[in-house]
Each structure stands twice: as C-alpha cells, then as structure tokens.
Image (tube, rainbow, N blue to C red):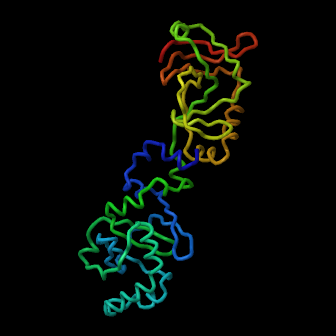
Amino acid sequence: MKSHEILAALPRWAKAKPDQILDSPAFAMPCRLGDEAMTMTLGAVEGADTLDLALLFGDEPHVLRLSRSPRFPELNKVWDVRSEIPAPILLALVEKECGAFFQLLENAVRRQLRLSGLADADAAAKGRFLHAQVADVSFSLTRTESVASALGSVRYLDIANPALRAETLAEVVEYAAFAMPQPDMSSIAVGDAILLPEIGSVPPRLVVDRRYVVEKAGVMPFEDDGRCRVVSGEPRATTLGELFDASEGDAAAMVAKVEGEFDANAPIQLKLVQGGRTVARGRLDRIGEQNAFVVEAVGA
C-alpha cells in the first residue's frame, strides 16, 4: 500500500466531506501556474485591500478576492489607484496579467472560467470563502459545493504535513498465527500452554488499527483469515507518519525495531484472538526449550 491508499482507507478520511478536507491544514493541491509546478495551500483570511472580481465557472457565479502580488507587475503598479481606473480598462489589465492564474483555477475547479466584471460590495462581503495561497498569490474564492467537491479530495492531503503525520492509531504485535480446531479452542483453560515455535524463527508482524499489516516487505491491508493469532497483550500507539514511512520503504526497519525490543525472558503479556474476539489472555513463558503462551485467563 502507498501512503495515500493508507489514508483513503481510514474511516476518518474515507468518509470525510470535501469541506472537512479543505479545512485540514494538510490540504496541498498540486497545480501549475504557467509553466511552473506549484501547490495550492490554505492561506490567511485576506485583508480589506483586495481586488474583488466576478467570475463564472460554467454558469455558476463566483467571487474571487485577489490580494496584491508581485506576480502581476502591471496590475501591481496601478493597485493603489485602481478605483480611479475605468472598469473596462482595469478588467482588460486583469485578464492580461492574470491569465495563467485564471487557467490554474479553471483546471482546479474543472469548469470553464470567465471573468464577468468587478464584484459588487455585497457579493464580495457575503458567502463562504476558501482562503488559499499559490506561491506569492493570495486569494479567496467563494466556496460553493462544486468548488469544494473539485478541491476537497483525500489525494490532495499532504502526507508530509506534521499534523497529519502525528495522528495516532492502535498497533499490536502479532507473534504467531495458526489454525486451531474449534473443540481445542473451546476447551482452553487457565494453566494451558500453547507452544509458539514461530517466535524467534518467523519475524513478527505489526497489525495497525486492524486495518493494515506491516511486514518486512511493506504495508498491506489486514485480512482476517479466521486463524488464531497470538498478539501483544495491549495495543500501543503508532503514528500515521510511521505508517507512511513504512509504506515508502521503512517497513523492515519498523519490524526490526520491534524484534530488537523483544526479550523472551521478560514477562510479556499476550492475547490469543480469533476474528476480533479475545479467546484467552496470558504471558510468554518457556516450556523446555520452546517459547509458549501460558493461559492466565479465558475470554476477554
């Protein structure tokens, strides 16, 4: 699994509405401004000194509040006196200077853009806006359902964003997995010992959120095949950042770290689970030369 596949499988983000994604500090949409590769990110709420333009995306009216930017040098020269310039002349200058930026917006929203005039004060003051930034261009665009739907996609979340990487998930270490006949499982009692020859000979797996498995080969979807599994007694927290790193090539290091923490002589607490149900709890112990799961309690 790649990082964005991991993210898209998490209920929080899989079920997220476009507006929730656009409110995330991790929003970072790749785009092009002219010939330059850029990223659209959230920006600060604009001040009062904006050029307010009326746009159409298809037939849908919008307001674009554009802040002063050195990206538009000719417009920048007349910025302080723009209210004195006749509207047709000002709009012609805007179309000439901002053509590449308008193309960026058209590509992002995936609807044809037309500049229809200057926005009136009431239209510019009302409605919900997306406040965004592309390089040195700060702007606000009315945040309609169509704009949110086009921009608010999980694939536009930046997996390098610290806030996103810091989100935590529950992780357990899977030491062994095996089939056990139902009569044997039903008869498990306190004091029983289940030999675990896998420990020390088969690398452990990390099961994260019962949704992902981290093995030395990488990160894969977790599939419960109905076998019994011996896992660490209590989950511990791992971060999305660690999971992303494992998916991008650090899985072997993540597993090796867990192997390095393992001490067969320490009183490690374990669980025997099947299908998400805890069958028994116990500890890691030695029976002769073998590692074993010694049952201390039956059930959850």
Tell me which corner region of the image, top left, top right, bottom left or bottom right, holds residue 200. Answer: top right
The mark tally for this picture is 0
The residue drawn where x is 51% and y is 33% is 210
Answer with the quarter of the image where residue 208 lies: top right
Left or right side of 101 for 272 = right
Judge whether 268 appears above or below 244 on screen: above
Question: Residue 113, percent across and down?
Answer: 37, 74
**At which x and y percent is residue 123?**
25, 74
**Where residue 13 sits: x, y (%)?**
44, 47
Q: Nearer the viewer, residue 222 or 74?
A: 222
Going 31% across and 80% down the picture, which residue do you hit? 116
- Near-viewer residue (24 or 267): 24
Tell me residue 240's x, y (percent): 55, 45
> Which residue sits furthest left?
122
Q: Taking 82 as reference, is 286 above or below it? A: above
Q: Quadrant of the N terminus?
A: top right
